[in-house]
Image: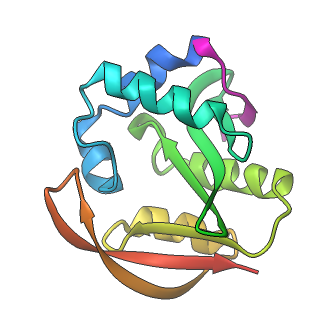
Amino acid sequence: MPVVALRAFTDADLDALFEVERDPEAVRMAAFTSHDPDDRAAFDAHMARIRALPTVILRAITVDGALAGTASCFAVEGDTEITYWVDRAHWGRGVATEAVRLLLAEVTVRPLHARAASDNAGSLRVLEKAGFRRTGTEIAFAPARGAEIEETVLRLD
């Protein structure tokens, strides 16, 4: 298995992350993405906003030292949620599972919440391996698909 680690996200990671988050298949699977993944100005503005928030924990996921995505924790409407994004080149190799495990070791707040498109079996599997349990579903607009879709809501106590 590759060596998966989390580290502080830096300005030097922005170009690589922008490319990773533009992958059409990954965007479709994530579903709840920016309206235009090719809009670099919007990406930079979004990253600047979230990096400036004191309540956001943003980590770079590395595989054998190279950027492979991000894992983060943030507050929304009084709940603490996690999210992650892994470069499609690393799907199916345990990278997301290990990255979530590492993030959960750092973020000790409980309960934690997570969400995934209900048809994103891989992401749901990663979250359930980490101990999250499904608590319900919601219908929400998914910009990557241009339609409302079902989203599964999960919780870790």
Question: Would residue 16 be found to the left or right of residue 106 on screen?
Answer: left
Q: Quadrant of residue 15?
A: top left
How far from the left and from the top, in percent, is residue 39?
A: 26, 25
Residue 79 appears in the rendering? yes
Front residue (pair 111, 16): 111
Q: 11 above or below 116?
A: above
Magenta stretch? 1-11
The quadrant of the image that shows the C terminus is bottom right
User: What residue is rendered at 69% in x and 51% in y?
Assistant: 98
Q: Residue furthest left?
A: 146
Question: Would residue 118 be found to the left or right of residue 3 on screen?
Answer: left
Question: Would residue 128 be found to the left or right of residue 44 on screen?
Answer: right
Q: Is residue 3 magenta?
A: yes
How far from the left and from the top, in percent, is residue 58?
A: 66, 38
User: What residue is rendered at 60% in x and 45% in y?
Assistant: 95
Q: Residue furthest top?
A: 12
User: What residue is rendered at 23% in x and 43% in y?
Assistant: 35
Question: Would residue 60 be found to the left or right of residue 114 on screen?
Answer: right
Q: Quadrant of residue 156?
A: bottom right
Q: Quadrant of residue 48?
A: top right
Q: 8 above or below 138?
A: above
How far from the left and from the top, in percent, is residue 79?
A: 65, 70
Residue 61 appears in the rendering? no
